Structure formats: C-alpha cells, structure tokens
Amino acid sequence: RLGQEVARTCTDHDSPARDGLPALQISKQFKEIENEFYENILKQRDLSRALAANKCHRCKLKEPHFQQASRRDQVVRDIEEYSFSLNDESLYLLPLLQSKMAVLRKLGYIEEDQTLTLKGRFACEVVTSDELTLVEVIMSGIATNLEPAEVVSILSSFIFMEKCEDEPEDPTDNMRHAKQAVADWHRTVDAAQKECRVQMEDPVTVNFGLTQVVYEWAVGKTFAEIMTCTTVQEGSIVRAILRLNELCKKMKAAAERLLGDTALAEKLEQAESFLCRPPVSIPSLYLT
C-alpha cells in the first residue's frame, strides 16, 4: 500500500492543478517503515515547506530565471575548469619560457631585469618566421652596401615558407656576400638557442628560394620573364611579394622611429615602389 501511495502522489504531482510535491500521508504502514526511509520523508516535508515559503517559488518568471541561473553556474564551472587547465599548461611551458628568455638575454634583446633593449623593441616591430636573425642582420649593417633591389631580395628569405628545390643564382657579388652573412647570423642564433636548450618543434631555416625571383622583379623584369627562372607557382610568388611589401613597411617605420636610420628607411621606401606594380598590385589575377 505504501508503494501505491507513493505512485498516487507522484501521479497527482504531474497534474497541472497541483503546485509542488506534497508530503506523504503515513498511517497504518508507519510501523513497517525503516528509520532511514522515515528520515527521508521528514526531509522531503521540510524541503517542501521551505520551497512553498520561498518567494522565488511563487514568481511567475521562476522557470526562465532558473534557466539563467543554471547557465550562469555552468559558465562559472567552465571558467574554473579552463583556469585550472591553463595553470597546468603554463607550468608545463615554464621551462621553455625560461630557456627563450635566456636566449633573449644572451643576444641582447632584454636586460637582466627583463626590460626591452633597442634590439628587442625592433624585433617586436618586425615579427617574421625568424625575427632574431633578421634583427641581427639589420643591426650588423649588412644592408648599408646593398641597393634597394638587393635589400628586398635578401628580406625574401624571412617571409618565404614553402619548400623549394630551386638553387637561385646570385645576380650580384653583394647578394652573394649578403646571403652568406644571413646564413652565418642564422647559425649564431641557432647556436644560442641550442646552448640555452630551446626545443623547437619546427626548426626555422633560412629559405633563399625566392631571392633571384624577387631581385629580378624589383629591377623591373616582367612576371613572364621571372617565371622562367623558378618552379614556384605564380600564386605563391604573388603572396610572397605582398608579404614582403608588408615587411618593408614595418621595417621602414621601425628604422625611422627606433633606429633613426633614414638611409635604410629610404631604401625600403624605394623597394616598396619596385615591388608594388601589376600584376602583384591588382586585387586578382583573374580580373586582368
């Protein structure tokens, strides 16, 4: 009979006319009830009374409010979970961070108190695939003896990421010496990283695959002419030249504002004018 009463109570609760779950009415079966079950019944009665006395229970908007509160609690739990995960990840990456900071101190990009030096500020302005080598190249004055076309040709090695089996020729002696200097500086930076135990998942390498293409383009040759000296696809060349142009703009601004090197800034400005001409400067190759 007790089971029947529980079932009847639940059925009555499902009726739209009822509001809340009433306490069970226990009579003859009282002696047969275990103490633990009786305690649960008393708790249910007390909770039902507290629910009925609560103002929120009588609110007409209790359902949408409950949903909002439920979503808020879920968001709070998500934030706590993500924060815990980020803390674990931060601890995992801490040795790598310390190693990279050691590299920056060794190469003179930050002071012992971790404040940025001039080299560090310049590196922040010209982020590339290998900005440390790029900054070392610029600070060493390699660009001083180069023409604008030669400068952008060398800079292409910092923005061209695709694999290329071409072995481009060196159009000038200055280019050959500059490429060797870039490779030497890259080895210096790489040695510093290895000494400080910086583990790189994808080691950066200097890519000279477009140096000849960029030089020929900068000195005024047509797109059809430069395609005869490379196997790189036209679209890849256009994208690389556009990225190179953006790098020139950033370096020009940094050279003027941070280094006060007006000669380098003028070379880069002139190089920009060499790079931005059709078909590179048009919105789409298919609209010509």
Image (cartoon, helix red, strand yellow):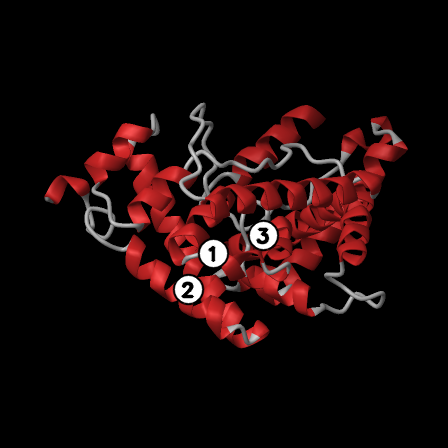
| Residue 141 on image: x %, y % | 59, 60
Q: Which residue is mark 3?
A: 134
Q: Quadrant of residue 162?
A: top left
Q: Residue at x 51, y 64 (%)?
A: 59
Q: Which residue is mark 2?
A: 267
Q: Which residue is mark 1?
A: 146
Q: Residue at x 70, y 58 (%)?
A: 50
Could you tell whether 78 is left or right of 286 in the image? Answer: right
Q: Is residue 201 above or below residue 115?
A: above
Q: Nearer the viewer, mark 3 or mark 2?
A: 2
Which residue occupies the foreground of this view, 150 or 135? 150
Question: Is residue 112 visible to the viewer in this orientation of the structure?
Answer: yes
**Distance CA(mark 3)–CA(mark 2):** 16 Å
Q: Quadrant of residue 139?
A: bottom right
Which residue occupies the foreground of this view, 88 or 153? 153
Quick one: label 3 or label 2, which is nearer the N terminus?
3
Which residue occupies the foreground of this view, 48 or 238? 238
Which residue occupies the foreground of this view, 275 or 5? 275
Question: Is residue 17 visible to the viewer in this orientation of the structure?
Answer: no
Contact? badges 3 and 1 (CB < 8 Å): no
Local packing at callout 2 (Cα closer than 10 Å; few below 14, some 14-19, many 20+) is many
| Residue 224 on image: x %, y % | 20, 35
Quick one: label 3 or label 1, which is nearer the N terminus?
3
Q: Is residue 11 above or below residue 61?
A: above
Mark 2 belongs to which amino acid? Lys
Mark 1 belongs to which amino acid? Leu
Label 1: which secondary element: loop
**Distance CA(mark 2)–CA(mark 1):** 9 Å
